[in-house]
Image (cartoon, rainbow, N blue to C red):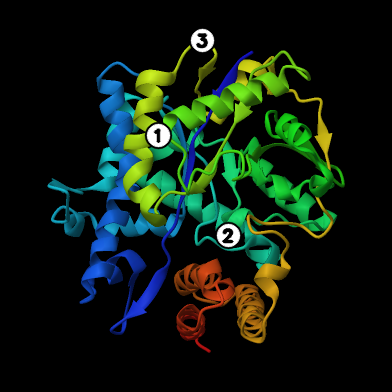
Amino acid sequence: MKAVYVPWLHMHQPLVWYNGKLMSNLQKMLLSKDSKESWEAKLMAAAYKNPAKYCLQLSENGYKPRIMLDFSGVLLESLNEMKNELKNVDVKGEKVGDIIEIYRKVMKKYPETIEFAGTAYSHCYFPATPEEDWEYQIEYWRVVFKKLFGEKNLNRVKGFWLPEMGVPGDEEKLAKLISLLKEYGYEWMILPIEALQGEKQLGFEQRTIITSQPHVIKARNETFPIIFRVRYDFIDQQAGCDANGVYEKSVLASKIFSAASNKPALIVPASDGENGNVMMNEFFPSTFVPFFTKKVDSHVYSMTVSEFFEKYYSVKGRIEIKSVVNIVPTGSSWIGSHQNWLSGDRRLEIKQKIEKLSADFHKILKNQNANKDKLEEAKKVLLLAETSCYVYWGIDYWFDQGEEMIKYAKKKLGM
């Protein structure tokens, strides 16, 4: 009985308007006169650095850490733009420094330790984002990642994270999304277990068997390998689960899964990497470091998801999976159905404005005489306007930010 534990951290920070300037929300928080807010921003900055910092330290000491990460393109750009400012940010006696540079260092010296997954550039919620813009969101993230980390590291990006884990249930839309992911070289994606048809009727052991292995989803003529994130009631990464807890739950999963397969059980807890005290202060010293220094053995160990596929589910260089599952027709996200994202007058109002903005952009795009450079600039702002935070968080501050971004995009389009 064996288990493969794969910690996954999702990172995102939107852009905001502050004193008439467009900047990262992280920068806005650092500049805040509210000492609590500015201190939290420092902890967030350190949290963005932590995966690289701890992977480097462990690797230099002879250990073999593994972690999955996804950063929105907006956040990657912001961290790069803030590199000089972050050099002066002190957290517990240590300067945060140039975060992008430390990732470059780890990826060059110990490339096997960190596997990045691709995602959308601006952290858009795919099921409610105009389909015409899906490709832009996928493509522009890759442009940003390549610019910062190079083509070699981009070619290592095989998995995909849907922002808010929002998966469309409509077969046509799902088939289109799968087709796009394949077109850009993606080989698998991670989904919430809540997206599985019939998930609510599953017992504990059935659910464990399903989350312990990869599957294939089908939509029209498209198929695509997927893995499921384990539920928070199994390993609640964001609320806190120490190395002992991770080990014990991994052993439990391996025992249950051994009744269904002779392959190792796959355990992938995935959560925001910068939200809350646990992720900012406790996860790495209490879970990550002790696991890789004291808990790894012949029964419970770690590798990245793509390594797992290659070792246990690859035949002649191709992923081969027998289990086929269906997605709920209503689609899903990390907090359940799309209704959680689409209800409420103001949400719908901003969603409609974004849809019109996108439609206007595509009309202008068809004009052969349009200025290509200006259109490219307008396209980027359109993608920013589609950031999930503005539309779906249900807070006036973020709705207002969304309205400002839509106005800015209209200005760029000459409207």
SS state under label 1? helix
Q: Position of residue 75 (x, y in %)?
A: 39, 57
From this viewpoint, which residue is outermost toward the right? Answer: 220
Q: Is residue 78 visible?
A: yes
Q: Position of residue 279 (x, y in %)?
A: 39, 48
Q: Place residue 23 in its image quadrant.
A: bottom left
Q: Which residue is mark 1?
A: 287
Q: Which residue is mark 2?
A: 136
Is the residue marked by circle 3 packed among few (<14), some (14-19), or many (20+) residues within 10 Å? few
Which quadrant is home to the N terminus? top right
Q: Which residue is mark 3?
A: 298
Q: Residue at x 53, y 60 (%)?
A: 123
Is the residue marked by circle 2 packed among few (<14), some (14-19), or many (20+) residues within 10 Å? some
Kind of residue sitting beneath label 1 = Thr
The alpha-carbon separation of the residues under discs 2 and 3 comes to 44 Å
Q: Residue at x 56, y 23 (%)?
A: 4
- Closer to the camera: disc 2 or disc 3? 3
Which badge, 2 or 3, comes first in the chain's sequence?
Answer: 2
